[in-house]
Image (tube, rainbow, N blue to C red):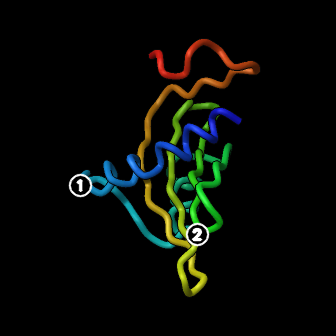
Amino acid sequence: MKFFKMLFLLFPLLMISSISTAQTQCGPRDNIVQMLEQRAGEKLKNVGFVNSNRVIEIFVNKKTETWTIVGSTLTANGDKSSCILFYGKTWLTFEEPVGNPASF
């Protein structure tokens, strides 16, 4: 639960930082999800709700340990738009919370 609260608090900062990077990829959610599945073999692992129209989604490939964080929005006309915010390698999953989340 603390993880989702942290995402809720950090989402505005993530959105601002993603706007300033030239590598941000945005588009219809279905296209982004399809691209992540086909190119990276990543599947949806976690969802954090920001509000009724916005979510943060984490896609992971357990074999290659790659991950992607996507911000998705439900638009006023009902379309789902997504932007890739961050991606990387070495995704670790813990059964129990480990240490201080801010210490890395």
Q: What residue sits 56% from the left and 28% below the top?
A: 91
Residue 6 placed where, x, y %? 56, 37
Q: Which residue is mark 1?
A: 22
Q: Residue at x 55, y 42 (%)?
A: 7
Q: Assign the N terminus to one quadrant of the image.
A: top right
Q: Nearer the viewer, residue 51 or 34?
A: 51
Point out residue 60 in the picture as x, y percentages from the top left corner: 60, 40
Q: Nearer the viewer, residue 60 or 70?
A: 70
Secondary structure found at label 1? loop
Q: Residues within 10 Å of mark 1 (few under 14, many from 20)?
A: few
Taking the spot 23% from the left edge, 55% from the top edge, the residue there is 22
Residue 24 image point, x, y percent: 33, 56
Q: Nearer the viewer, mark 2 or mark 1?
A: 1
For residue 48, above or below residue 62:
below
Looking at numbered disc 1 in the image, what kind of residue is underneath it? Ala
Q: Which mark is residue 30?
A: 2
Three-letter amino acid code at disc 2?
Answer: Asp
Q: Is residue 83 left or right of residue 60?
A: left
Residue appearing at x 50%, y 46% in the figure: 69
Spatial separation of the CA atoms under disc 2 and disc 1:
22 Å
Q: How many numbered marks, from 0 up?
A: 2
Dot 2 or dot 1, earlier in sequence: 1
Mark carried by residue 46: none
